[in-house]
Amino acid sequence: MGKVLTVSRVAGFEGVVRPPSDKSLTHRAYILAAMAKPGSASVIDAGEAYMDVPGGVSFSRIPGTYESTIQDSLRGEDCEATLECLKALGRFGEHLSATETRIFGGPEEWHSPESPLDCGNSGTTMRLLCGVLAGLPGVEARLVGDASLTRRPMGRVAEPLRQMGASIVGESSPLEISGKPLRAIDYQSKVASAQVKSCVLLAGLNATGTTWTSEPALSRDHTERMLTALGVELQRSDLLRVGVEGGQVWGGFNFRVPADISSAAFWMVAAACTPGARVTLQQVGVNQTRTGILDVFEQTGVKVEIHRETEELGEPVADLTVTGPAELKPFHISGDLVPRLIDEIPVLAVLATQATGQSTIRDARELRVKESDRIAKIAEGLGEMGARVETFEDGLSIVGKTALSEGTIVAGGDHRIAMSFAIAGSLASGTTTIVGAESIATSYPDFFEHYDELAKSE
Ligand code: S3P
């Protein structure tokens, strides 16, 4: 049954927190640091390119080394799984302190791990590592995960990697991979998925020729931005199609990971749902491919002030202050907006219950294959709390405004469902019970500390 939490109604939300660091960026920083090699052209360029970016945040590539220092990485279970897998593959990585992690790439061979690589609950770990491992001849690995990850589709990365010449057995966890010399492909993904795109690009870096990948709508572009910042040349035929020539290398780097807008989203919605509330989230990554929630807030009439804008390894960063309006308008999410807020949909569904009128979320079939079937989980939980919810194969429609009442929510190994219903519980009468809340540690270990800091008692 796991950890059970109870949440009661609060009077409002007020204060300032720095949400946990970005999960997507931490995975990528660890993996790209582990792949670094010295002596590349990009490293020589970087000798002159030590630079201070606007806003005074320093970004640096480290000339001639393959040692990277990652500051403020996310210490949630998902990213720890990535680090442990990289160590099992022969890379050196260690947390030097609560805020600093050192990782060595280097010329040494990657080696086959002695036991299965445990990706835990993390789809990003499994899919991105598939891209790395596919092009490492002689390395053989078995990738496994927890019950939730085992249900998730892996054919979407196995298919392009097999086309490139990789040997992968399995369509879902466990996967058996044997690294092979890879050839470039031109892959058209049917889903807008940063995990698929990143997997293909990482494999493309070890392939002969230029590997292209395209997607139906633009998913988060962190891999592209980080590679570019490290001196790797990417090609683009249009916004949705990106290519990389194999054989390019990069050296060590310093990177400070900004806060995760997907975690900030819980407090942004909590503030939005409470008239007069005012919450500031510090150092949040505001890459355009992640800020769909701001578009929804504009539709809904929620004011967001953006200040102290800086940049970190090609990623824009800012403080966000959200003020709760007297009334919320309904909103509509579909098409290209979906990948820009895919992980925020559970908590935006809570927002929809507090808006006056019908909100709709469509073109979001991907929610069915996240850490849980999120369409079903949202409908089940919000329905139990008295909301008017209709489901579709690709989304939901929610009619508000509803005075939510207490419920019992089974989070089903899904951190974002657990946290979204903690926010719903803070708005509801009575006491809401969340079963399976241990999953929160995958992305937001300090969630309840921040809850206590921001929530004002009745
Ligand atoms: C992620 C991409 C998204 C997102 C996931 C993290 C990433 O998944 O839902 O939480 O770091 O690349 P998809 O790329 O499968 O849409």
Image: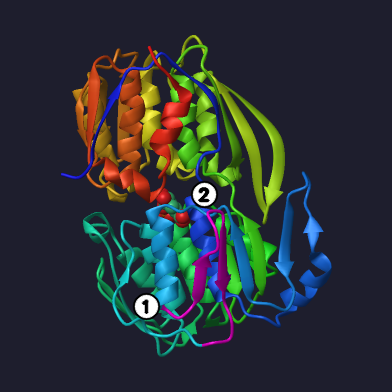
Image vertical order of residue 128 relative to residue 278, above or below? below
Query: Which quadrant would residue 437 be assigned to in this image?
Result: top left
Image vertical order of residue 367 relative to residue 282, above or below? below
Per the rendered image, the range of residues in magenta is 89-108
Q: x and y percent of residue 63 in the render?
A: 75, 74
**Residue pictured at 62% horizontal, 40% vertical:** 283
Q: x and y percent of residue 163 in the render?
A: 40, 77
The residue pinned by badge 1 equals: 162
The residue pinned by badge 2 equals: 22
Q: Nearer the viewer, residue 375 or 446?
A: 446
The residue type indicated by label 1 comes to Arg
Q: Is residue 165 left or right of residue 211?
A: left
Q: Name the image colouring.
A: rainbow
Q: Is residue 31 magenta?
A: no
**Residue pictured at 71% horizontal, 43% vertical:** 310
Image vertical order of residue 328 relative to residue 392, above or below? above
Q: x and y percent of residue 239 in the render?
A: 60, 54
Label 1 and label 2: CA atoms lie apart by 30 Å
Query: Which quadrant would residue 445 be assigned to in this image?
Result: top left
Element on which disc 2 rests = loop
Which circle's residue, 1 or 2, is located before the other in the chain? 2
Residue most toward the front?
Answer: 97
Element on which disc 1 rests = helix
Q: Is residue 304 left or right of residue 176?
A: right
